[in-house]
């Protein structure tokens, strides 16, 4: 059972193909809501600027607070604009797919719209090495493709997973989904199933490179000494790999939709002061190596909607202050 941090922050809703599809839809909705909400907030602030300025001046509130709100909302509107455009393109090609003669034709049209792959690829590091039983100590790949066309593959080289794609852009979420499926398949046949992603190259390339080189050193030493595994590992059978390719094919339509959206992936840190400023004697903090875009953009959407609600509340129910 994944922890709350896994479900809500690092890898929300990527356990199954249906949840992956829903996650992409929720992410598209989040970008659209944030874009529309930010524009609505700016419009309200400009429309009722005289009211807000009068209230701030007569209630001893800094007038620049209003300017900060407008700049903040403008920043979020710019940030979410590519996502809102991507959501519109998803809807457009969904309508095109319904009008197409076959499902495959609609998906191929979507692939052409996304464009060719970029040079950069998503790479992560695992805590356990993955090997194929029929080819021990060798790298192998899992094809990601369906009837509409190939979406690249996932190259497995020990603890290193690399997503090699044929269409433009792609997030780390596919690799998180892949690991969920590996753990589920291993658990079904009674093998250890606690593989986790511990390094994300797109977020921290230096730390990831150090970790992967350290593991490669251990595996090279293992081959040189011809001894047992020096690094913990899990083994996949040929049947496991075939099942993985089947599960990868199930999310190809969602991957094509996801390629229309931006991928804001960063580290996250949360601090909880036990004794707040100005003393600040002690505080609790927790950091995550990856914050999924759905989690970060979802928080931004709540902030935007909260600001819009407050602006509307002031218009509908103006507070009384001396002189008004």
Image (spheres, rainbow, N blue to C red):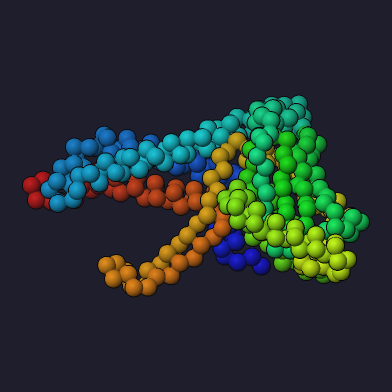
Relative to residue 217, is residue 80 depicted above or below? above
Horizontal side of residue 76 vs 181, given as left or right: left
Which of 262 and 138 lies nearest the eye of the viewer?
138
Outermost residue toward the right?
134
Q: Quadrant of the N terminus?
A: bottom right
Residue 13 visible within the image: no
Relative to residue 238, is residue 21 depicted above or below? above
Residue 2 visible within the image: yes
Q: Quadrant of residue 143?
A: top right
In the rendered image, residue 278, in percent from the top left (x then y), is placed at: 27, 67
**Residue at (66, 29) in percent of width and height:** 115
Q: Quadrant of residue 223?
A: bottom right
**Residue at (57, 43) in percent of width and height:** 263
Outermost residue toward the left?
323
Horizontal side of residue 159 vs 140, given as left or right: left
In the rendered image, residue 178, in percent from the top left (x then y), is placed at: 72, 53
Relative to residue 196, is residue 23 depicted above or below? above
Q: Quadrant of the C terminus?
A: top left
Which of 313 and 157 lies nearest the eye of the viewer?
157
**Residue at (79, 61) in percent of width and height:** 219
């Amino acid at each position: 059972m994944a922890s709350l941090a896994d479900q809500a922050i690092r890898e929300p809703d990527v356990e199954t193909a249906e949840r992956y599809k829903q996650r992409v839809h929720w992410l598209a909705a989040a970008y659209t809501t944030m874009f529309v909400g930010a524009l609505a907030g700016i419009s309200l602030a400009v429309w009722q600027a005289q009211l807000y300025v009068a209230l701030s001046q007569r209630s001893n509130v800094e007038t620049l607070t209003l300017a900060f709100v407008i700049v903040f909302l403008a920043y979020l509107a710019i940030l979410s604009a590519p996502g809102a455009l991507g959501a519109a393109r998803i809807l457009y090609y969904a309508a095109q797919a319904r009008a197409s003669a076959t499902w495959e034709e609609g998906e191929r049209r979507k692939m052409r719209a996304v464009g060719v792959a970029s040079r950069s690829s998503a790479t992560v590091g695992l805590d356990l090495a993955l090997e194929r039983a029929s080819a021990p100590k060798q790298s192998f790949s899992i094809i990601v493709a369906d009837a509409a066309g190939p979406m690249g593959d996932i190259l497995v080289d020990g603890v290193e997973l690399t997503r090699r794609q044929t269409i433009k852009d792609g997030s780390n979420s596919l690799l998180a989904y892949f690991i969920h499926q590996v753990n589920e398949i291993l658990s079904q046949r009674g093998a250890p199933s606690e593989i986790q992603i511990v390094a994300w190259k797109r977020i921290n390339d230096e730390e990831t490179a150090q970790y992967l080189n350290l593991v490669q050193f251990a595996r090279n030493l293992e081959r040189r000494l011809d001894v047992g595994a020096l690094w913990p590992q899990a083994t996949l059978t040929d049947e496991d790999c075939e099942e993985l390719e089947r599960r990868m094919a199930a999310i190809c339509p969602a991957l094509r939709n996801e390629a229309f959206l931006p991928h804001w992936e960063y580290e996250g840190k949360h601090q909880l002061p036990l004794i707040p400023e100005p003393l600040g004697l002690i505080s609790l903090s927790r950091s995550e190596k990856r914050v999924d875009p759905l989690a970060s953009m979802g928080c931004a959407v709540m902030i935007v909607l909260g600001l819009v609600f407050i602006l509307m509340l002031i218009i509908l129910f103006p507070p009384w202050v001396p002189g008004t």
